Image (cartoon, coloured by chain):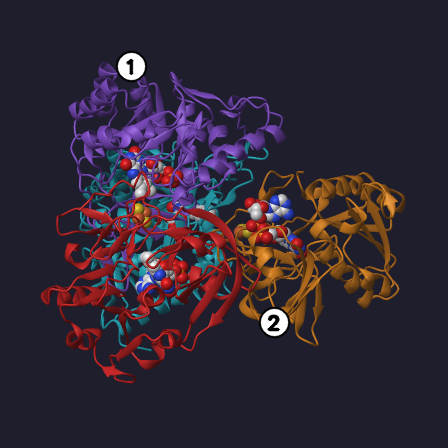
Chain colours: A purple, B cyan, C red, D orange
Amino acid sequence: MSTVNMTVQIGSLKMRNPVTTGSGTFGFGSETKDLVPLDRLGAVTVKATTRERRLGNPPQRIVETASGILNAIGLQNGGIDDYLANKAPYLRGFDCPIIVNVPGENPNDFAYVVERLTAAGAADAVELNLSCPNVSHGLDYATDPQLAASVVAAVRKVTSMPVIAKLSPNVTDIRVIAKACEDAGADALSMINTVVGTAIDPRKRKFRLANITGGLSGPAVKPIALLAVWRCYNTVKIPIIGMGGIACPLDAIEFMLAGATAVACGTGNFVDPTLSLEVIDGIEKYCVENGFADVNALIGAVTAA
Amino acid sequence: MSTVNMTVQIGSLKMRNPVTTGSGTFGFGSETKDLVPLDRLGAVTVKATTRERRLGNPPQRIVETASGILNAIGLQNGGIDDYLANKAPYLRGFDCPIIVNVPGENPNDFAYVVERLTAAGAADAVELNLSCPNVSHGLDYATDPQLAASVVAAVRKVTSMPVIAKLSPNVTDIRVIAKACEDAGADALSMINTVVGTAIDPRKRKFRLANITGGLSGPAVKPIALLAVWRCYNTVKIPIIGMGGIACPLDAIEFMLAGATAVACGTGNFVDPTLSLEVIDGIEKYCVENGFADVNALIGAVTAA
Amino acid sequence: MINFLHGMQTYELFRFVGIRIYFGVIKKEAAQVVSVTPLSAPRHFVLTMKSAHLASHSRPGHFIAVAADTGSAILRKPFSVYTVNPDAGEISILFSVYGPTTTAMSRMLPGDSIDVLGPLGGRIFDPEPIKGIHHILVGGGYGVPPLNYLAKTIRASAPDAMVTVIIGARTANLLVGDDDLLDAGVEVIYCTDDGSAGVHGRVTDALLPLLKSDSRVYTCGPTPMMKAVGELSEAHGVDCQVSLETFMPCGVGICVGCVVKMRDGVFSRTCTDGPVYPGCEVAW
Amino acid sequence: MINFLHGMQTYELFRFVGIRIYFGVIKKEAAQVVSVTPLSAPRHFVLTMKSAHLASHSRPGHFIAVAADTGSAILRKPFSVYTVNPDAGEISILFSVYGPTTTAMSRMLPGDSIDVLGPLGGRIFDPEPIKGIHHILVGGGYGVPPLNYLAKTIRASAPDAMVTVIIGARTANLLVGDDDLLDAGVEVIYCTDDGSAGVHGRVTDALLPLLKSDSRVYTCGPTPMMKAVGELSEAHGVDCQVSLETFMPCGVGICVGCVVKMRDGVFSRTCTDGPVYPGCEVAW
Ligand SMILES: Cc1cc2nc3c(=O)[nH]c(=O)nc-3n(C[C@H](O)[C@H](O)[C@H](O)COP(=O)(O)OP(=O)(O)OC[C@H]3O[C@@H](n4cnc5c(N)ncnc54)[C@H](O)[C@@H]3O)c2cc1C
Ligand SMILES: Cc1cc2nc3c(=O)[nH]c(=O)nc-3n(C[C@H](O)[C@H](O)[C@H](O)COP(=O)(O)OP(=O)(O)OC[C@H]3O[C@@H](n4cnc5c(N)ncnc54)[C@H](O)[C@@H]3O)c2cc1C
Ligand SMILES: Cc1cc2nc3c(=O)[nH]c(=O)nc-3n(C[C@H](O)[C@H](O)[C@H](O)COP(=O)(O)O)c2cc1C
Ligand SMILES: Cc1cc2nc3c(=O)[nH]c(=O)nc-3n(C[C@H](O)[C@H](O)[C@H](O)COP(=O)(O)O)c2cc1C
Ligand code: FES
Ligand code: FES
């Protein structure tokens, strides 16, 4: 279509365009096969895969809020064995890098899953979910620089794949965590995970979520996410995958201007599973219209008002 | 109209109903005199008043985001002299408690303004703005329990008025700050102040706000605010004034169910300056319809889903 | 039971006590609105749209997801396929006005475009009737539209099949129109809580006398109703298929937010592992 | 200059080089839409609504704030009062369709209700003409509606006053209709950037030859235009009133988000300290 260079690089991972999916918002790639040919994506980031199978939280798991949703899925997934046996083979059928999201309750858990993924060649990069706010103790690693660094370091030892540390916005200063992860050997950062919150049904006088608290995502959080990206961009040298409320191509461009090398469509997939394709095309069109021969020129290109 | 007891108590401050205004979102009470008779409010919380006059930030100061706004006003105000000379006399013309919001750059600043207010009898309670994220160093007091406590303690010494500590959501664990303020002698807490964020104009490739960062408010932040209230309600014994995204009476009821003794209408005033009146009537109606003879029965009455 | 937790990788056709696994090819379309017709029940409408794709791929139990609200509620909303006209390339949904999406739908005009995703649903009703079986369809609320489609499909493929539809509502004027069912020779029994039409009582009161060993029950509607119908059927050893209409944020299996608990302890995604389940599998 | 930073405490009437301080009593109303009429300029409309209150309290320079968008953009949007018919108890606004609010307004039907707050504005144009003065009104974009109202008001109170309206636009078909100005005996000069109508050039090209010591200039429109007009007037020693249409989140003085910088370094709220200012006070 055009001569714009759309390729970006996340550590040693080469993406054909800057667009991936938010973990947990795009399943394992097969659900929407009628709608999204995986080999058009820059990368596919799949749902969290834990050491053991997890049943997840009871419903109600998702509720709508103003321009957003709250979720408390509780990391329902089949575990690493299931991923390797039933998900990876399908994903490997496409010419599309796979980023596997890995949560864990301690550094060993993270390292175990990453080691299995590495050995099986079942991922092209791993994203450490330091920050899932819905599981007990799940938050700790993302809120303390030392703890976050300990996970990154443990994983760093067992893989040569790019290691992406996914950061939580639920901290006083995200830059401190970002720096700690970079120093511990992370190849990239991704942000933001969801913002903790809750919702109440005033008629029933009950919490709306079975889990009481959930993670806020969608357009409502975009201002929070953009600032997180901008602050980290000015703090670390490693690339950033930006996400939080992307609902159209211009949203994605805001993230790149703020300093993101790549972006992820998350909650937006629920509204329109083809959103990532639209965003890819929209970014390319923006580059053409604004005279950018290389999409990388957008990264961090925002200036003062 | 009914026999519902609508009176609530914030420390020694008695409010005829649980509804006040968010500081900075209702001016000094005179601007909307055609629309809101002050003596109908539970209390009026006025704009931040600093030691010296402040010019504030250059425009653009406010931008719209999804279900919210970002603001970076920069505490424009005439200073304590102007407040005492030109604002307090007007406010004192009404049978309505006045809560004055006080920011400061160090504990002495806070104490100075509170002392002046106390001496002049120009307020019925003070709200310490520990958390305004738009002024350099403004955030510090709200993000560190010791610093927050130091401000509360300094103010506590110079006044017998109720001291309300206003907390920021931009922290890893708001409960820690809440507890520190309670221990330092705060009579009440108010929350949340705005959530830090930014917005970019992708066409101009510039930040939308002259200040780059701003504070997010409006319906978008309600889930974050409700959880802050619920968590603090379960941590401290002092009453909480809840705010963040209230746009209708049921929103206010969510806050009371989460543990707020009183609520404040903030950004909602920009959309409808009469919102607080609607909320007062709506809360009373809710009590009647749901068989609550006392509005205080709503406080913290939420249960698990 | 096969675990479909993470989505199917090929299309399959599999039958299990009358439940069919059939994923239609999912498309996102800007379909053209043909008509929006008010029904006699207050705030109820039938919306018909042009979609050759949906008309040829939608089976009873499938649903579509509509994005009609441009406001602050961001999710699509699911609606069961109510009638299908493959020749005209049209499908209809029947809805009642509740929130922003249904309000917007009720205001659409012929020629407007409606953003739809579908057909959705993995396990659906099996429309091929087994000989000698008495098909009893029990519905209430927005469970009626899919059962209507199912009843007509059974009738069309087996004109001799015994088909009874039991429809419950609080009061007479909330019973949604199904004259076409009577026209198709389906027996229709109404039940109202207040006795203002048909049987004075619940759908289970009408169901009980009909339950025989040759019965098969299909139900869709409010959860308490489906639970009661499912348990009653099970107690009489009768197969019962329930179509679970939970809140469905994405409709395509990627959010895992629509789950219900199964008796084996697993949380199943109603959008793609359902919406139709054997009643005996659900942990009500 | 009086500092109105924190809102007026009593209604005042104060004149300063043709600027009037006049706060109407502000009301929030659900006004009834009388008509929404498309203009020849593409996507431009005039919306007329019933409001005895606004019709009797709105003066040239006042504006109203409309809440017509129920979506995710939460703020009201301001619109200048365009025409007032006190006898019929009606006022009109002229708008072009831009975002959600104006889109919703363009789709309103007679009889619909429109949520308005007004009249808003503290310092407004002074409609009482001083004898022998040549009133020159320079407008562009959505600065035209308030000047239209001002021109007619001056004409009505002083039929002999010399009134010239200069209207600029990019191209001919964006010039908004003001036949009624000509009818009222006002001289109208059009300027287009592309020369497709009237003077080929900017409004300042048309203004320059008219500037005399007996002139008084009023301007409203895009900021660069107002700056140019203000500076040109000042250079010729002519009083110039500018109506600053900044982004106005609340319109009533409580958000302090609408400010512009004044030459004395203070940030002034355009909604209540303005929108009309002496051009020489503004730090462009
Ligand atoms: C598989 C499936 C099939 C469906 N088929 C139909 C159908 O054929 N016809 C039909 O009319 N509806 C059907 N529904 C229900 C339909 O999806 C809802 O009515 C729809 O969400 C309404 O959207 P809305 O935007 O108008 O209201 P919403 O924005 O969804 O409503 C506002 C609020 O009310 C809640 N809510 C929504 N609907 C209800 C309800 N019925 N009862 C209580 N609370 C509610 C929401 O959680 C939300 O908080 C179906 C649902 C499912 C899952
Ligand atoms: C005092 C005053 C008087 C006004 N009078 C009129 C009037 O008489 N007629 C009229 O048509 N308009 C008038 N305007 C402008 C009008 O308020 C805007 O056009 C209005 O905000 C459009 O609302 P919307 O919801 O349609 O678009 P918005 O939702 O406001 O637009 C979407 C986005 O575009 C931006 N935006 C809005 N308008 C413009 C614009 N014109 N140029 C560039 N970006 C924009 C917004 O910041 C927002 O981000 C006036 C403004 C002021 C301050
Ligand atoms: C339903 C849901 C499930 C999610 N699951 C995960 C997960 O398993 N691991 C993870 O790192 N992030 C998870 N996230 C967070 C998203 O990947 C993303 O970081 C966040 O939602 C912000 O982006 P968005 O606003 O575009 O959705 C989940 C989000 C949602 C809405
Ligand atoms: C324009 C604006 C100015 C504000 N100024 C202040 C302030 O001066 N002091 C303060 O403590 N909070 C200030 N706030 C925060 C509000 O009082 C309130 O805590 C916050 O906006 C959340 O409530 P809301 O979502 O209802 O607006 C301001 C908020 C806005 C939108
Ligand atoms: S609705 Fe999203 S997985 Fe079922
Ligand atoms: S628009 Fe809010 S103060 Fe002017």
Say which chain tag 2 marks.
Answer: D
Secondary structure at numbered mark 2 = helix
Residue B229 location (% of width, % of height): 26, 50
In the depicted structure, whether residue B231 falls above or below residue D49: above
In the depicted structure, whether residue A141 falls above or below residue B7: above
Residue C97 location (% of width, % of height): 41, 67
Residue B149 location (% of width, % of height): 25, 38
Side of A155 where D251 appears, left or right: right
Confirm whether residue D237 shows in the render: no
Q: Are marks 2 and 1 on the same chain?
A: no
Side of A147 where C157 appears, left or right: right
Frontmost residue, C86 versus D120? C86
In the depicted structure, whether residue C202 falls above or below residue C99: below
Between tags 2 and 1, which lies in front? 1
Residue A232 location (% of width, % of height): 39, 25
Q: Residues within 10 Å of mark 1 (few under 14, many from 20)?
A: few
- Label pair 2/1, CB-CB below 8 angstroms: no
Q: Which residue is mark 2?
A: D53
Q: Quadrant of residue C207?
A: bottom left
Amino acid carrying mark 1 in the image: Ser
Frontmost residue, C18 versus A289? C18
Label 2 beta carbon less than 8 Å to ligand 2: no
Q: Quadrant of residue A196?
A: top left
In the depicted structure, whether residue B255 falls above or below residue B107: below
Frontmost residue, B240 versus C10? C10
Secondary structure at numbered mark 1 = loop
Q: Which residue is mark 1?
A: A160
Amino acid carrying mark 2 in the image: His
Q: Quadrant of residue D111?
A: bottom right
In which of the image's four quarters is ligand 1 placed?
bottom left
Frontmost residue, C85 versus B39? C85
Residue at 28% x, 59% y is A201
